[in-house]
Image: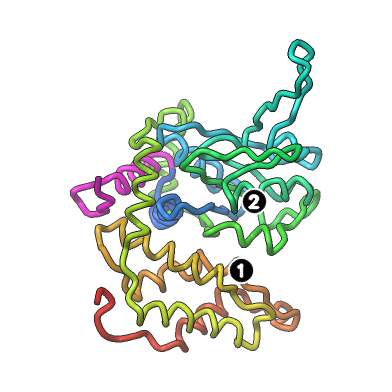
């Protein structure tokens, strides 16, 4: 199996191409999303309504022949609606566990910030440890397992902002942006009839994704690039506009994503450009700015831009 993203294809390219049938003109966001899948991480898609957040999540799930479920998060959703519940069976005089929708390979959580913090916390164990504990019994989740969550950053009424501990569980956060004119014209044809997502057919199996994740973990990271990763993290902690810089978990996440990115184009080692390309999607949602910086209009992406510009890029042979 190859994850080669070149013209000869490969599973990575096949999944990206499959999603492009639904989402026109946004290949970068799609490649980032599939990179997150290959890295074995979870994805948060944040943008204004109507730009294809849910369609992206659905089309990725439909591109892989494995179990996928969708959860519409609302203010009255309970933790048991996500994880499942134990029900007393009179015939056996025992409690029987009925799994919730979290027991799937790809779980799409729509408008995750509309659920209460208590319900949001039901995802923490599943996302971090790939297991669910109900009534003191732990149930493992299947592999692969990925949560794709969406949220609208501009509509705050009836929402509960995700706490830092929840945000940290997402390997990457991406936006969709508006399509260009040509892509939006093409969209009018693609989405004129039946749902384009319903026409998506699987191009990979769940076992393929597990294998892709294993391949990505073997991608070589030279010692000089490990130092570069740590230097970037340290620079975020020292930046005057950052109240809280990125954690060691974020450093590990960036290495993981860079490995998947390199594997997707058939490279067996990462280079500095892999790290720089993914620094925004992996690190920006983990940065907390000072109140003064927020009032001054600064953004996490601006802080990361400063950090990437100030930390020297290592020279030498990254594959050595």
Few, some or many residues within 10 Å of mark 1 (<14, 14–19, 20+)? many
Q: Residue under circle 1? A: 286
Vertical comparison of 175 with 195: above or below: below
In the image, the segment drawn in magenta is 1-22
Vertical comparison of 22 with 32: above or below: above
228 or 44: nearer the viewer: 228
Q: Residue under circle 2? A: 151
Label 2 vs 1, first from the N-terminus: 2
In percent of the image, x 65 and y 42: which residue is there?
Answer: 132
238 or 22: nearer the viewer: 238
Q: Horizontal placement of 73 versus 139: left or right?
A: right
Q: For mark 2, give the secondary structure.
A: strand
Q: Horizontal placement of 280 versus 85: left or right?
A: left
11 or 142: nearer the viewer: 142
Few, some or many residues within 10 Å of mark 2 (<14, 14–19, 20+)? many
Q: The N terminus lies in which quarter of the figure?
A: top left
In percent of the image, x 50 and y 65: which residue is there?
Answer: 253
Q: For mark 1, give the secondary structure.
A: helix
> Magenta span has 175?
no
In percent of the image, x 72 and y 80: which residue is there?
Answer: 290
Between label 2 and label 1, give the one nearer the viewer. 1
């Amino acid at each position: 199996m190859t994850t080669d993203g070149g013209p000869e294809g490969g599973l990575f390219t096949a999944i990206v191409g499959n999603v492009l049938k639904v989402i026109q003109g946004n290949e970068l966001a799609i490649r980032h999303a599939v990179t997150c899948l290959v890295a074995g991480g979870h994805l948060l898609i944040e943008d204004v309504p109507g730009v294809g957040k849910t369609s992206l999540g659905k089309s990725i799930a439909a591109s892989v022949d494995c179990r996928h479920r969708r959860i519409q998060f609302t203010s009255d959703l309970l933790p048991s609606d996500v994880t499942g519940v134990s029900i007393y069976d009179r015939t056996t005089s025992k409690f029987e566990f009925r799994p919730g929708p979290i027991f799937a390979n790809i779980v799409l959580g729509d408008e995750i910030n509309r659920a209460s913090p208590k319900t949001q916390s039901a995802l923490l164990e599943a996302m971090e440890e790939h297991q669910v504990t109900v009534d003191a019994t732990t149930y493992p989740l299947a592999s692969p397992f990925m949560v794709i969550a969406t949220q609208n950053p501009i509509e705050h009424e009836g929402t509960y902002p995700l706490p830092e501990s929840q945000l940290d569980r997402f390997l990457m956060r991406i936006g969709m942006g508006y399509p260009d004119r040509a892509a939006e014209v093409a969209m009018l044809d693609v989405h004129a009839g039946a749902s384009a997502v319903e026409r998506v057919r699987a191009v990979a199996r769940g076992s393929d994704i597990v294998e892709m994740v294993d391949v990505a973990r073997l991608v070589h990271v030279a010692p000089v690039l490990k130092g570069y990763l740590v230097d970037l993290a340290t620079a975020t902690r020292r930046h005057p506009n950052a109240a809280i810089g990125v954690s060691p978990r974020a450093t590990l996440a960036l290495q993981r994503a860079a490995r998947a990115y390199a594997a997707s184009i058939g490279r067996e080692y990462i280079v500095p450009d892999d790290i720089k390309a993914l620094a925004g999607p992996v690190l920006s949602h983990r940065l907390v700015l000072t109140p003064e910086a927020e009032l001054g209009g600064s953004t996490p992406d601006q802080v990361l831009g400063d950090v990437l510009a100030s930390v020297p890029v290592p020279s030498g042979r990254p594959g050595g």
